[in-house]
Amino acid sequence: MMVSQQDKITVSQTVIVITNFLLGTGILTLPRTSVEAVKTPDVWLSVVFGGLIALLAGFIMVKLSMEYPEKTLYQYSRDIIGKWPGGLFSLLLICYFLATSSFQVRSVTEVMGFYLLEDTPLWAMAMVFLWSGIYLITGGINPVARLYEIIFPITVLIFLVVIFMSASIFETDNLRPVLGKGIVPVMQGVKTTSFAYTGIEVLLIIVPFMRKPEQALKATLIGISFPIVFYMITVIMVIGALSIDGVTSRTWPTIDLMRSFEIRGLIFERFESLLLVIWIMQIFSNFTISYFAAAIGLSQLLKRRMEPILFGLLPVIYLIAMTPKNIDQLFQMGDLIGNSAIFLVGLIPLMFLVISKVRRRKFEKN
């Protein structure tokens, strides 16, 4: 399937797609999950190391995609490892993207139900999310990228304003001592913080949609750098304000940080609603691009038009999203998706790149 010129995206749009896909549930949960793993105030170092691993993975994915610049991973996986193994891998990747999109839908309904729309049925909130997403995606990746261009600056502005307003309750002592227990706890937390950067696998799908695919590496470096900075600021401010013990006792510590202070005299005295607004927009971004990736994968695997597949996948996403019975099962689902990402989008692209390079050298010799 060749990508039409009308459905191509610019380098800056690629940057924003990568950034928006990486910024998701992690803004709310990363402080808690990373502190549980590290158990020291040095979590921000784990976030940096996790980001460096994401940069390395992004580099590998771009190099692999540049070997087949006009094809997505679904198409060239069959060229690399054969029709049937490649088809099976594509199916696993489609399931991964479906699970990711379902996880985002359920996450947003849980948070909205708890903080914003109490007593509203989960299915009602999920339906609004799902139908809004399908309305956007039916136009292709171009309208998706253009919407993200609107969402991103709003996210940056509101996030920075709200997070730095919490400086009044920030305690530097909560971040000390630096490396008090050495580097080992920091390294133990790298696996957890790396999960926050799952989403970089979108590179394997969107490079063929770039107008200038030769600049994919530049877009990747910039696109991953933004989330590293966002996550670092979030972790430092949340731990500095709530302390290590305060973070581990809360399900959504970033929202609790916003609820722990108020500034009288302003139009808004409580700021968690503003944070939730931008977070919902980011989750919508995450959901739509993973939904798009699953649909285009099935479309290319079955060699069928994408629109009917989009509508066919809608009830599947809903059913997967409603499967977890409570918040603990939802987090277990998130862990499962993160663990599968290590193999599906971490190790396998590296293996594909090695096989592709070896084959190319053999072909050149012959």
Image (cartoon, helix red, strand yellow):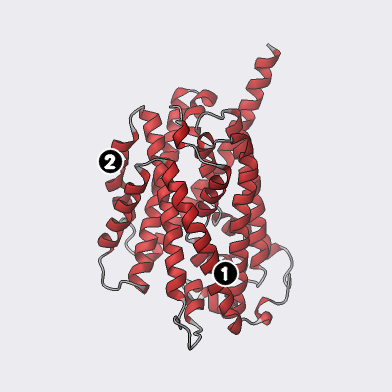
Q: Position of residue 259 (x, y in %)?
A: 47, 80
Indicate the amino acid at tag 2: Gly
Residue 200 seen from this side: no
> At x 63% / y 61%, what residue is drawn?
229
Q: Position of residue 52 (x, y in %)?
A: 67, 52
Disc 2 marks which residue? 312
Gap in angstroms between the C-alphas marked 1 and 2: 39 Å
Helix, strand or loop for disc 2:
helix
> At x 25% / y 61%, what residue is drawn?
124
Q: Estimate how packed mark 1 is, as few (under 14), some (14 to 19) or many (20 or more) residues with alpha carbons within 10 Å.
A: some
Disc 1 marks which residue? 160
Q: Residue furthest bottom?
A: 264
Q: Position of residue 244 (x, y in %)?
A: 59, 76
Q: Is residue 96 rendered to the left or right of residue 162? A: left
Give the quadrant of residue 326.
bottom left
Q: Is residue 200 rendered to the left or right of residue 114? A: right
